[in-house]
Every structure is written in structure tokens, then in C-alpha cells.
Image (cartoon, rainbow, N blue to C red):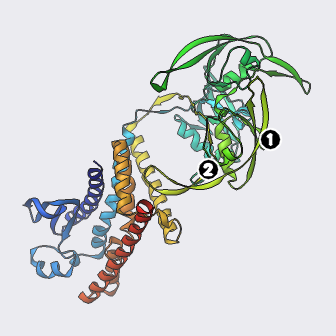
Amino acid sequence: MSLLYFLLLLGALVAVHEFGHFVAAKLLGVRVLRFSLGFGRPLVRFVAGDTEYRVGIVPLGGYVRILGEDAATSATRRDQGPALNARPLWQRLVIVFAGPAANLVFPVLIYFVFFAGQQSLPAAVVGDVIADSPADRAGLEPGDRIARIDGHTVRYWEDVEAHIADGVGRELHLRIDRSGRSLERYLVPLERTVRTREGLERTAGWVGVSQAPFRPRIGVIDRRSPAGRAGLRTGDVVFSVDGNEVANWTDLRQLLSRGAGRRAVAYLRGTPVPGLPSLELLSPRVADLVPEASPDGGRQRVDTGIAPAEMFVRRVEAGSPAAEAGLRPGDLITAIDGRPIQHWILLDQALQSDPARTWTLSYLRALPEGGADRRRALVTQDRRVVDDEYGNRGRRLAFGASNAADRGVGELVDIDGRVSYALAKAIERTSETVVEMTTGFWSVLRGESIESVGGPITMYRVASVSGAKGWDAFLLLLALVSVNLGLINLLPIPMLDGGQVVVFAVEGVSRRPLSARARARITSVGLAAVLLMTAFAVRNDVLRYLSP
């Protein structure tokens, strides 16, 4: 199957490219001598009009032969129809550009099919609010439906994200619907640089809202705390407090902070299914929780012993910075550099904000006899060479500790105008891909990211892995590689379409065709350039996959 996916990937993209040249030539009245899918001895061959169509025995793309594209065809077949080299410069340019253009339009069709298959999107409804964030201080609450931002109607969560991303330092006016009431809220997005451990980053606005709610899954570090004495355990999911529904962590935090009175906590506890470790049976239970109150600077501090389960360390990689700092599974991380923290995503972004810095993590470790030991760990992350699922080698920022992520599902809404939405998203996604690929090309030309260039082995591996994931993944890969192929063919290298453009431009300026000797030299230079690029890509393949 891996070979089949590789042949489908390469064959489809080259066929699309050549089909672009074919269509443009036909529309402009230039004679197409042959259009072939595949190479070598023809399995199927027929003539329609003045063009021979064939399917070759070697299914590696295809080719198109146009009258007048080289000296041989223009000399021996000039009497058989209109030739390319006899056409005006603009027509020759259109035919040459049609190949790369087809590779750039093809992803639009793929993305259109992909997005047209979606029936719903995350709604513009707040799933949860991070404590002490701009959204929290502005009075936003989980369940608020955002109807308008600065006078613009919003329907989907991606609309909300777009307004927030572009609103750094500017006050946004939000109109929200809450339980049938229309309210107005004002907030100013903070600038935040979002990073990935692979080194990518982007700067956007942040207000501290999430479309997916933080589930009210709790953790208990001290079995002698009020929660521990009530029988609550790490991993329990609370669904009501004193009969009030709990849908997210914000609901739970607010209900438990209402004084030190007794609380009736209804929750679900999971029991692993034998032989199916990924499944668990949930059973409802009720706990009688009695919080402890203590003075705190003139105010009453309420302690329940309940913490977010997501801040408990689930796994620690051996030899990682987290392991060397002393972190263990079951530890509860409470603060970073003295700042309390309740969500792992905030911890992760803080660590990535300054990769070379030594961070101080405050955490609790359960004691066997009850209680918890307060500890601190100094963590300095490092960069490690890792291979992704496609076998691509890269450097990744390593922390080494992870939690048990447990995000809920936010509200969905039907897409309004699926066809127009799919077309707009397809064009947007293709444009973003073109920009990213172009940026990558410039990085390679400047001598950066040279190791990212791949050859046939890389192509084979990527096609195999994507195909094994399913047709969605394979089609998305097809779109990415199609853009790549289209841009590569626009490079001003002889033998590529970009090189043909240069030749046509020279002939247009000089008002006479290049001599056969000049064309031969240009072809030799182009062949040398292509062979050099191929050799470099194969070298990277060998170092990536075949070297010890």
C-alpha cells in the first residue's frame, strides 16, 4: 500500500501540472501533439482531433508535447498546425504559467471538498474563563454567547479569535447573550506570543477565554484535607454542588468559594475496564464536603483541598529536565516563579516564553501518612533531536513532564452557507500555504533550514504515513505537495517553467529566437541545476533515514 500511495501522490500532482499546460494550449489554439498519463510503452493509445492520448506503463505522472516547444518539433511539424514558438509572448507565458497555476488551484479544490464536508463549527459561546484574565475582570462567564464585537456580527468561535488576535491594546466592545438577556462588556486583549516546542511562534491578542470548557475533574493531594476526608480522590469529575449543575472548572471554583458551609458534592468516579485500559466505567457518588475557613489578611480563606486535576503530573520522561529537577508522577504543580497557576496550558506557554531561562516550579508532594510536602524545583529546558511520525528529524524544546489532558467539548452551530464558507476557507488555506512555502524556500536559499529539504525517500515515507491515516490526511498532504511543486516550477531555472519564462522574455526583448546552440547551453545549465538539487535532497534522505 505504501508504494500505491507514493505513486498516487507523484502521479496525481504531475498529471495535474501537465493538464494545466494542456488546457491552456488547447484554449489558445496551439497544437498539442501528445498528452500522456505515465511514461514508457503505452498501455492505451488513441487519437482524437489532432492530439494523441496515451496511458504509459510507468505510472509516474505524465507529460505533454506541444508543437513548437523545441527546435525539433517546430522544424519538422510546422505544417501540422499552430506552433508555440510562433505565438505572441503573452500566449506563450500563459501556457507556461498554466502548469504551476494548476498545481496552485488544485489545493483549492481539495480544501473545498474538505471544508464542504463540515456541517458544524464551534459556536461563539464561551466555554470557560481563566481566573484573573481580562475576560474574567470584564465579567464574562461560561455560557455567554458573543453576538457582536465592535459592531460586527459573529457566529463562529473562529470569528471571536480573529477579532481578539487583531485587537491587541485596543478596547473591544462585546455584546453578549446570557440566559435571554443582552449585555455589553468591554475588554482589552493583551499581547501574547504563542510558541510551540518545535520553535514556531506567533503573536496575537489574548483575553483568557476558551471555547472548550475545562472539565471539573478534580485532584486531591492531601488525604487529610476536607476533600480527602470526604472521600474525594484525584480523577473524580464533579457534576453538581448543592444541587447546582457544574459544567466546567469555573462553575466549580465559584460554587466552592461561597463561604465555609457544608457542601453536598455529586461526582462521577471511573473504574478501569479489565483488558481495556482506555475505557472506564463511571459510577455516581455523593460526598459531604466541609471546607475549612481561616483568616487571610482580614478576609476569610476557604480551603477545600480540591485542585485542578490537570495540574497533577501524570508522566515524567526519564533523563528529562523535569526528572533531573526531581518531579515525579502525582506531584501537584502550584506556581511558576512564585505566580500561582491553575491551567497546564498557561504553564506550558510560560516555559516556552523564555526557553533558556531557569524556572522555579513550586509543587506539592503527597506524604504517605497524610499531608503534603511543599517543594521547589529549578528547571532549565533543553533542545533535543527528535523524529516525528514522518521520520523527519528536528529539534524540540523538552520539559519532560506531562499531565492527563481532559478538555471538554464546546457548543457547535450549523454552518450558514456551506458552499460559500467552504470556498472562502479553501482560498484562505491555500493562500496561507503558499505564504508558508515561499517563506520556507527563502530560508533554504539563505542557507537556513537546509536539513528540511527532502528527496524521494522522504516523499515515499510521508505518502505512506499519510495514506495509513486515511484519505483525509492523504488529500491534505496532496494539497501541500501540490503547492510545493507549483512554486518549485516557478523558480528561474532552465528546464523548469520559470526557466522557460526567462527564455521567452529574452526572446521577446531581442525579437528573435535563441539559437540551437544557446538553447543547448541553457538546457545543460538547467539539467546541472536540477541534478544538484536532486543530489542535495537525496543526501538529506540518506542522512535522515539510512545513516546510523
Q: Quadrant of the C terminus?
A: bottom left
At 74% from the left and 48% from the top, the residue drawn is: 359
Q: Is residue 271 visible?
A: yes
> Relative to residue 50, is residue 248 drawn left or right?
right
Check disc 1: other Cα within 10 Å, few if <14, some if 14-19, many if 20+.
few
Image: 248 above or below 58: above
Image disc number at residue 71: none
State the residue lying farthest toward the right.
298
Image: 216 above or below 266: below
Choose top left, top right, bottom left or bottom right for residue 181: top right
Residue that numbered label 2 is attached to:
398
Q: Inspect the image, locate mark 1, and give the three-letter code of the amino acid beneath it.
A: Gly
Whichever of callouts 1 and 2 sits on the residue coming sooner in the sequence is 1
At 61% from the left and 11% from the top, the residue drawn is: 285
Residues tagged 1 and 2 counted as in contact (Cβ below 8 A): no
> Relative to residue 494, is residue 59 drawn left or right?
left
Image: 324 above or below 224: below
How many tags in the picture? 2
Q: Inspect the image, locate mark 2, and give the three-letter code of the amino acid beneath it.
A: Ala
Residue that numbered label 1 is attached to:
338
Helix, strand or loop at mark 2: strand
Q: Position of residue 180 (x, y in %)?
A: 60, 20
